[in-house]
Image (spheres, rainbow, N blue to C red):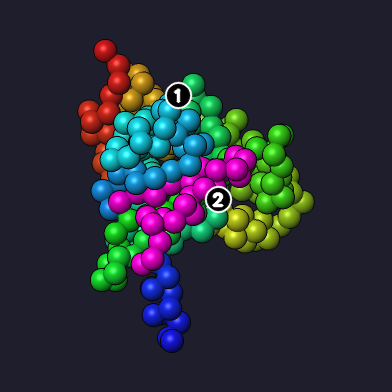
Amino acid sequence: MKPDVFKREFLDSLDSLGGLEELFENLPNLWFFVKDTEGRFITANQNVVKMCGQRTVADLVGRTDFEFFPKHNAEAFQRDDLSVVKSGVKIVDRVEPISNEDGSIRWYTTNKIPLFGRDGSVIGVAGTTRELDADHNPDPVYAEFSGVIDHINRNFSQSIEIESLAKMMSLSVSQFERRFKAVFQEAPVRFILKIRVSEACKQLVNSRKPVSWIARATGFFDQSYFSKQFSRRMGVTPRQYREKYYQGS
């Protein structure tokens, strides 16, 4: 029997996911989920259920991230999901920041893969997310960059020189940039921009401060450059983003 035929016959005999999701229930500090092409939850482990403030998996099924997370976070999750659905290309061990409601930033590593139907088309996304906690659950990769990341988190509103980050790890700029990109899958400059845009999103939806003030407060000293970088990452201008997601009164 051909391998692909053998595999399909076995999978066809499974009841739903065959209970495979149970494998993820007892893994600490890990979130597992399956969504359809519209971003609606199909299943998830209890860590996801609790993060969403629900009691059972059934409370999630058919609902989207926008019902449980801040708009700027839900949009980021959605962009990743749609990218995987449209391209069929998986995301592997990408380290990224997620800002919380209280303004703090936590770090996570994410994996997402496309799920294919019997006709070969993408019918959904399966993923795992794991929080990186250098203090309580050390991760070798995260630990190597923890000082650098902490410096970026505390100083994103100011000018950050790549040379100073490289010195913190006793590396040349070229060595630092190569190692950083290998771990975070983007250059340090782009990574810092991501942090600044993430913080700008939070301020745009939680305050009525002028866009020019938010630009300066998040390290963009030129408003036109801020608008350009924000639009490139978020798909809309800062003002359009505020109009869509403003949560004030």
Assess disc 2: are there few (<14), some (14-19) or many (≥20) residues with their C-alpha within 10 Å of its C-alpha: few
Q: Quadrant of the C terminus?
A: top left
- In the rendered image, the residue lying farthest to the bottom is 1
Please tell me whether mark 1 sits on a helix, a strand or a loop: loop
Residue nearer the viewer, 237 or 11: 11
Residue 118 position within the rendered picture, expressed as x and y whole percent measured from the top left: 29, 69
Q: What's the residue at 22%, 28% (across, down)?
A: 243
Q: What's the residue at 27%, 28% (across, down)?
A: 245
- In the rendered image, the residue lying farthest to the top is 249
Is residue 217 within the magenta segment?
A: no
Is residue 17 within the magenta segment?
A: yes
Which residue range is magenta in the image? 12-36
Question: Can the viewer see residue 191 in this picture?
Answer: no
Instruction: Check residue 23 in the rendering and tell me which mark sits there, or answer none.
Output: 2
Please tell me whether mark 2 sits on a helix, a strand or a loop: helix
Residue nearer the viewer, 217 or 38: 38
- Write down the quadrant of residue 237 in the picture: top left
Residue 167 position within the rendered picture, expressed as x and y whole percent measured from the top left: 73, 48
Residue 16 position within the rendered picture, expressed as x and y whole percent measured from the top left: 37, 55
Residue type (three-letter) at the residue carrying disc 1: Glu
* Comparing labels 2 and 1, the label whose residue is closer to the camera: 2
Q: Quadrant of the N terminus?
A: bottom left
Query: From the viewer's perspective, is 130 left or right of 75?
Result: right
Question: Can the viewer see residue 235 in this picture?
Answer: yes
Which residue is disc 1 drawn over? 101
Q: What's the residue at 40%, 37% (across, down)?
A: 57
Residue type (three-letter) at the residue carrying disc 2: Leu
Q: What's the residue at 43%, 43% (across, down)?
A: 44
Residue nearer the viewer, 96 or 53: 53
Residue 8 position within the rendered picture, expressed as x and y whole percent measured from the top left: 38, 73
- How many angstroms separate mark 2 from mark 1 (CA)? 30 Å
Question: In terms of sequence position, does the residue under pointer 2 or pointer 1 come before the other?
Answer: 2
